[in-house]
Image: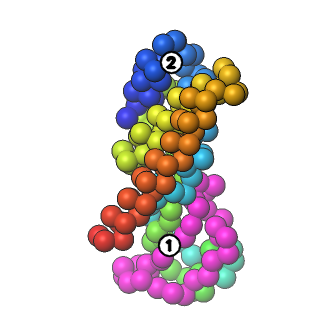
Amino acid sequence: MEGTYFKERVEDYLNTTLEEQEVVDAINDCLFAIGDRALNYSEITILVDDSNVGKWIKPEESVTAIIRAFDDNGRETNKWSTRAAEFKFDEEGTYKVEVRLMPEPISSISDEVDIHPLFNHAILCYLKGYFKLRDDDSSIDGQRLMQEWQTWLEWAYQTLKKARTNE
């Protein structure tokens, strides 16, 4: 879904018009809060030679976990170590590393929010609650919506986690 999808629904709910940038910022805050629970996976290629064998390699900041590694023959290998979000390999070679990533922030309201659709309702609850509480920090409706955000976030995460475990 594009950011405009969320903006329009929140504006309808609040019966007001919101500035595009404030909605972009709120969506990005929400994506950051979802974080690792988005279960976004990717594969990166790492070339290990004499300059970096046995040395800690720090991937891009959006990497939250290193899941597993494969050698250049496509076989899973355990000849690597991890510490937080860094890793090192014991032998030279080209490795494909499966990683988990944070959701990508958007820069424009027309950008695609790149997250599994199961999270869409949670994002809507967050945005509605955020803007309600921004205008009135004691809003009962805003507090209810933020509670719904937590419930829907956990539901989306558990549903996606279960589905991916059964693949």
Question: Closest to the observer: 85 or 47?
Answer: 85
- Pick the front one: 93 or 64: 64
Task: Identify which residue is drawn at 43% across, 60% down.
Answer: 158
Q: Residue 35 shows which numbered tag?
A: none
Identify the residue shown where x is 43% and y is 78%: 70
Can residue 85 be found in the magenta stretch? Answer: yes
The one of 114 and 96 positioned closer to us in this rendering: 114
- Of the numbered discs 1 and 2, the one sitting upstream in the chain is 2
Above or below, 42 relative to 139: below
Residue at 33% over, 64% down: 163
* Residue type at the position of mark 1: Ile
- Classify residue 18 by image quadrant: top right
Q: For label 1, count other residues whose C-alpha is less than 10 Å away and answer few (under 14), some (14-19) or many (20+).
A: few
Q: Amino acid at mark 2?
A: Leu
Judged from the image, the secondary structure of the residue bearing numbered disc 2 is: helix
**Residue closest to the eye, 17 or 103:** 17
Q: Is residue 108 left or right of residue 112?
A: right
Dot 1 falls on a residue whose secondary structure is strand
Q: Which mark is residue 67?
A: 1
Q: Residue 14: which numbered mark, if any? A: 2
> What segment is highlighted magenta in the picture?
57-86
Q: Percent from the top left, x then y, of residue 72?
A: 41, 79
Where, quadrant-wise, is the N terminus in this rendering? top left
Where 64 sits versus 33, above or below?
below
